Each structure stands twice: as C-alpha cells, then as structure tokens.
Image (spheres, rainbow, N blue to C red):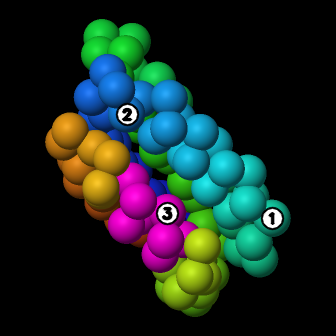
C-alpha cells in the first residue's frame, strides 16, 4: 500500500476556490481503481492550510491516478491558487499490529 500526504496553504482570497477544487478532486479520486482512501482536511492551527491524506493499493494505481487529466489539471490549478504550494510525499506502508 502507498500513503500520500501533502498540504497547501491558501490566501484569504483563494481559500474558497482551493477548498472547492480540493473537494471536487477528492470525490472524483475516490472512485478510481485502487483508491483505498482520499481526503482533504483543514489544519486546526492554520485555517487556510489544507492537508491531503490518501491510501492507494499499489504504485500502479497511484501512477494511473497521477496520469488522469483531471488530476493533472487539479494540481496545476492548486499551485496557481496557493499562497504556499506546500509539498507532497509518498510512503510505502504495511498494516501492522502494535
């Protein structure tokens, strides 16, 4: 399984549009093959920052997601709207018991 985390910070003027496109992207992505979880969340300390958390079945599913034209358009639009485009990281993960 792959875990994707990321964040981006809006300006007060761009927040509503960033939130709108992020939710649109999340809802569309959840229907893609191999998507186990996809969400966007507001930062409790900085209400202009959006956090993304995703789980994908495997690298092939994530690569397919990145190749979807709507995903590419979302990333480009998010960067254009963001006061700080933040970053994204991808991790390999396995469920374990502690």
- Neighbour class for label 1 at 10 Å: few (<14), some, many (≥20)? few
Position of residue 6 relative to residue 69, above or below, is above
Circle 3 SS class: helix
Circle 1 SS class: loop
Q: Is residue 59 visible?
A: no
Q: Tell me the distance, in whole angstroms, between the alpha carbons under discs 1 and 2.
A: 27 Å
Of tags 1 and 2, the one toward the viewer is 2
Query: Picture coordinates of residue 52 (x, y %)?
Result: 46, 44
Q: Residue, x 49% and y 71% (percent of image)?
A: 73
Position of residue 62 relative to residue 12, above or below, is below
Numbered circle sitting on residue 14: 2
Q: Residue, x 53% and y 86% (percent of image)?
A: 67
Q: Are marks 1 and 3 in contact (CB under 8 Å)?
A: no
Which residue is at the front of the view, 87 or 59? 87
Query: Picture coordinates of residue 47 (x, y %)?
Result: 37, 16
Point out the residue furthest to the right here: 31
**Residue that numbered label 1 is attached to:** 31
Query: Picture coordinates of residue 70 (x, y %)?
Result: 60, 73
Left or right: where 93 falls relative to 69 = left
Figure quadrant of residue 46: top left
The magenta segment is: 71-78
Q: Residue, x 73% and y 60% (percent of image)?
A: 28
72 part of magenta stretch: yes
**Residue that numbered label 3 is attached to:** 74
Left or right: where 15 falls relative to 26 = left
- Neighbour class for label 2 at 10 Å: few (<14), some, many (≥20)? some
Q: Tell me the distance, in whole angstroms, between the alpha carbons under discs 2 and 3.
A: 14 Å
């Amino acid at each position: 399984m792959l875990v994707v985390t990321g964040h981006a910070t809006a300006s007060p003027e761009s927040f509503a549009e960033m939130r709108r496109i992020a939710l649109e992207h999340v809802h569309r992505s959840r229907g893609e093959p191999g998507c186990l979880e996809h969400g966007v969340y507001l930062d409790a300390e900085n209400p202009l920052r959006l956090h993304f958390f995703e789980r994908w079945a495997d690298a092939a599913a994530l690569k397919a997601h990145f190749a979807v034209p709507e995903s590419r358009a979302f990333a480009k639009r998010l960067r254009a709207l963001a006061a700080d485009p933040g970053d994204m990281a991808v991790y390999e993960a396995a469920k374990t018991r502690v």
